[in-house]
Image (tube, grey):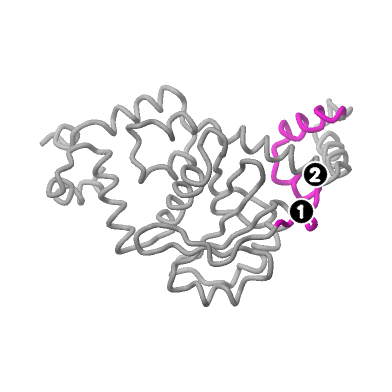
Amino acid sequence: MERLQKVFPLAVDSGVRSIADAFDIAYEILLCNYRNEYVFKNAIVSKIVFGRHKPSTASAILELPLGRSIADVAVFNGTSTVYEIKTDLDSFARLTSQLRDYRTRVEMVNVVVSERRAASAERHIPEGVGLLALRRHGSLSVIRPAISNLDQMRSEHIFGALRQGEVADILRHHGLQATAANDPVSQWHELRDLFSELDIAQAHKGAIEAFRARGQSAHEIATHPSLPKSTRALVYSTPLSRVAMRRLVSRLAEPLPRTWGV
């Protein structure tokens, strides 16, 4: 709240009064002057989940572990898509290993940079990986579309990205079940072996549904009319109970002077 208070004069000058409006003002300052990773994440969630798709049919997961890498934003609708962000302060040193991890676990892989780095980024990106650029006003432009990695994906790699309960549900859907119920270590190995035997289409479809279900908990608050557009990425990265959701929306609607005791 102390950091948000720094934009209070700008918020007042712009004619806004609520905390929600102040967040949007703060985000606009970041968008114009300091494009950190959050600005990229929020742009991807807004333009992809809310623009290209719908929150009711597409889920976003931020900071999703995939192999030895962590995907900045992963979106699941009819397929799986990863967006790896490289801000102007990031190097491309780890990009090769990150893309290698993603391409055996998700179907579509994209790298997202600022417009000024698009040409440089393209030299570091292998064929098949998409490239998007964040424009000055906050829109995303497709420099190069991603191509399906389905032929490179591996069921045993997808297994590592899922929770054991999710794996068990997918296997039950295909009439398979682990028998080593009383030994957690043996059960894990059995689940991995069974899942690895699924063909990639079955494993991928099951993973999409599992990840969509995991991210759907944010759907209710993400679509709330009182939620600032600038906080969409926060909603998809912070699990909230229904009580916490109602409290957050109520707090965001409060006028600034009341909140700070002015």
Residue 151's x, y, as percent?
Answer: 80, 56
Q: Which residues are magenta?
A: 148-175
Taking 262 as reference, is 104 above or below it? below
Label 1 Cα crowd, 10 Å radius (few <14 / some 14-19 / many 20+): some
- The residue where tag 1 is placed is 150
Q: Is residue 253 magenta?
A: no
Residue found at the very far left of the displayed protein: 262
Residue found at x 64% / y 64%: 129
Taking 84 as reference, is 23 above or below it? above
Q: Is residue 174 magenta?
A: yes
Amino acid on which disc 1 is placed: Leu
Q: 203 left or right of 231?
A: right
Secondary structure under badge 1?
A: loop
Contact between labelled residues 2 and 1, with CB atoms less than 8 Å apart: yes
Secondary structure under badge 2?
A: helix
- The residue where tag 2 is placed is 201
Q: Quarter-wise, where is residue 246 in the image? A: top left
Label 2 Cα crowd, 10 Å radius (few <14 / some 14-19 / many 20+): some
Nearest to N terminus: mark 1 or mark 2: 1
What is the count of numbered marks?
A: 2
